[in-house]
Amino acid sequence: MEYHNPVLLEASVEGLNIKPAGVYVDVTFGGGGHSKAILKQLDENGKLVAFDQDQDALANALVDERFQLINENFRNIKRFLRFYGIKEVDGILADLGVSSHQFDVAERGFSTRFDAGLDMRMNQNEILNAFTVVNEYAEADLKLLFSEFGELTNAAAMASTIVQARSEEPIKNTEQLKQVLSRYLPAHKSHKILAQIYQAIRIEVNQEMEVLKEFLEQSLDVLKPGGRLSVISYHSLEDRLVKRFMKNGLFEGEPEKDFFGNFSVPFKTVGKLIVPTAAEIKMNNRARSAKLRIAEKK
């Protein structure tokens, strides 16, 4: 399987402040790049558990007694760590979004570069796919996801156009979807708008915002005091959730104050926001929108 170099590799692994005998989790295994870097810093007593819901990633499993790959969604991190007898860990790394492999395999339907069936499932065993979203969702629901997940200004018009088109015949593939929405794709920014449309549908198909929230909340339960959380995000929706949760342990509202009037928050942020260098972006175009945030559990 072809997987590109992992994004922000050194900074994200360095952010974990690895203890050689510690227990770490890579919740987005993919091609195994981050996992390999973590294993290099562990001694014979260290352990690394990795998660990936995509069946394709299993082909990259590392042969190492200290390593365990779990073919599950990381929204279930707490349950599966407990299943393997692990209650607390020293660090968790998450590289969110779509892997380079998923983008590059045309039939998965993630990339605007290829004509493919409307799929976009990260876990190919799931029932909900892009075809169902595009052809069966109510107009109001399509408008909402284009607005919230795609941050598209003409979400209502796009939703209406899709509903009108599919009433005549199903929209079966990405090329048909592009044709249906062509009036909203001016040549000078068609790629950007298409990416937003695909992002909106993909986030809905994979329930990415709900999954991220569940994962972040569970990370608090499984991290030891002093344990690190290192998260790479690729769009503002993800980054806002990560930033807010690391800042005060909540997704909305304000944290409670203690007896002395100080805010009681579960994390302390480590360093500032980290973004890729121009050199890394040149080597790996996927890195261009990446943002790395690191926090330590108090």
Image (cartoon, rainbow, N blue to C red):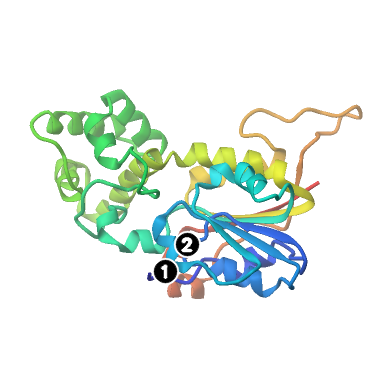
Q: Mark 1 points at which residue?
A: 3
Residue 4 vs residue 292, the one in the foreground: 4
Question: Dot 1, crowdedness within 10 Å: few (<14), some or many (≥20)?
Answer: some
Q: 176 or 276: which is nearer to us?
A: 176
Please report the residue visible at 64 percent of the width from the left and 38 percent of the height from the top.
Answer: 217
Residue carrying label 2 = 30
Hey, which residue is sitting farthest left in the picture? 168
Q: Is mark 1 on a helix, strand or loop?
A: loop
* Mark 1: amino acid: Tyr
Q: Earlier in the sequence, mark 1 or mark 2?
A: 1
Q: In this view, does 71 lie above or below 151?
A: below
The extreme right residue here reads 260
Residue 241, image quadrant:
top right
Helix, strand or loop at mark 2: loop
Q: In this image, 271 relative to 75: left or right?
A: right
- In the shown orientation, is residue 178 left or right of residue 296? left
- Image location of residue 64, percent across then percent down: 60, 71
